[in-house]
Image: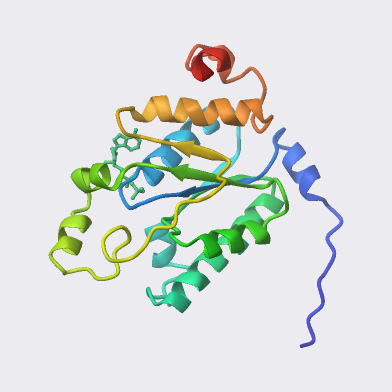
Amino acid sequence: MNITWHEQTLSKAARAKSKSQKSYVLWFTGLSASGKSTLANALEHRLHASGHHTYLLDGDNVRHGLNQDLGFSDEDRVENIRRIAEVSKLFVNAGTIILCAFISPFKRDRDMARAILPQGEFIEVYVNTPLTVCEQRDPKGLYRKARQGEIRQFTGIDSAYEAPDNPEITINTENKNVENCVDELLVYLQQNNLIHRNELLGNGNIPSCRSMLT
Ligand code: ADP
């Protein structure tokens, strides 16, 4: 192949600095209806409101465009995640905080995505909502269809979900409202210097780190 990598001289750090932020991927994984899209969307609003430059990539939306040629075979699922991870890497290079909401049920696929991103720039957010709760919520009626056999290979019903062993963040959404969950995510980001300091914890919207952790 006559393709060579063209070195760019404007760095990722320089691009991110022009937005006064660090750039990285927040990768939300969990069962269908666990709350990935809801939380990623609400978190993006909070980050945007405090001056961060963000972008949200969501499962179904990507399949309408970039990945419209892919189905749900094992091979296609891997390719789906690979492309999303590569696109995420471009956004990170552009200096953006990217939020990805994909069931991504298999560890090896998430590990592949992690390996595509530089160390420390892939933050796995495990939305750990019990299957019974997801099934009760069933906002799109998909669990009902899966139980009736109208959808095959549905994660949690007749296809496995492999929970992460060492996610950077675990959120259990059962018995918590969306804002409380977003607050937990913001505390993590602030404690790890991933968002502007003092802007979020100091504005009265979310409790101090100490009260979140005790
Ligand atoms: P997913 O993207 O994981 O498939 P969705 O975000 O589409 O899940 O759906 C989650 C559903 O659960 C929504 O109807 C949302 O309103 C509801 N929900 C209730 N409590 C929470 C919470 N704490 N966090 C996120 N979603 C919640």
Q: Is residue 198 above or below residue 142?
A: above
Q: What residue is shown at x 54% (from left), y 32% (from top)?
A: 47
Q: Is residue 64 above or below residue 102?
A: below
The answer to whether residue 87 of the structure is visible from this angle is no
Q: Residue furthest front?
A: 165
Q: Residue furthest left?
A: 148
Q: Position of residue 182 (x, y in %)?
A: 45, 30
Q: Is residue 183 above or below residue 83?
A: above
Q: Position of residue 181 (x, y in %)?
A: 42, 30
Ligand 1 in which quarter: top left
Q: What residue is shown at x 47% (from left), y 16% (from top)?
A: 205
Of 202 and 189, nearer the camera is: 189
Q: Position of residue 180 (x, y in %)?
A: 40, 25
Q: What residue is shown at x 24% (from left), y 45% (from top)?
A: 132
Q: Residue furthest bottom?
A: 1
**Left or right of 141, for residue 1:** right
**Left or right of 83, for residue 92:** right
Q: Position of residue 150 (x, y in %)?
A: 16, 69
| Total labels drawn | 0
| Quarter containing the N terminus | bottom right
Q: Quadrant of residue 90?
A: bottom right
Q: What residue is shown at x 67% (from left), y 47% (from top)?
A: 121
The answer to whether residue 191 of the structure is visible from this angle is yes
**Left or right of 36, for residue 139:** left
- Tell me, what colour scheme is on the image? rainbow
Of 67 and 187, nearer the camera is: 187
Q: Quadrant of residue 110?
A: bottom right
Of 90 and 27, nearer the camera is: 27
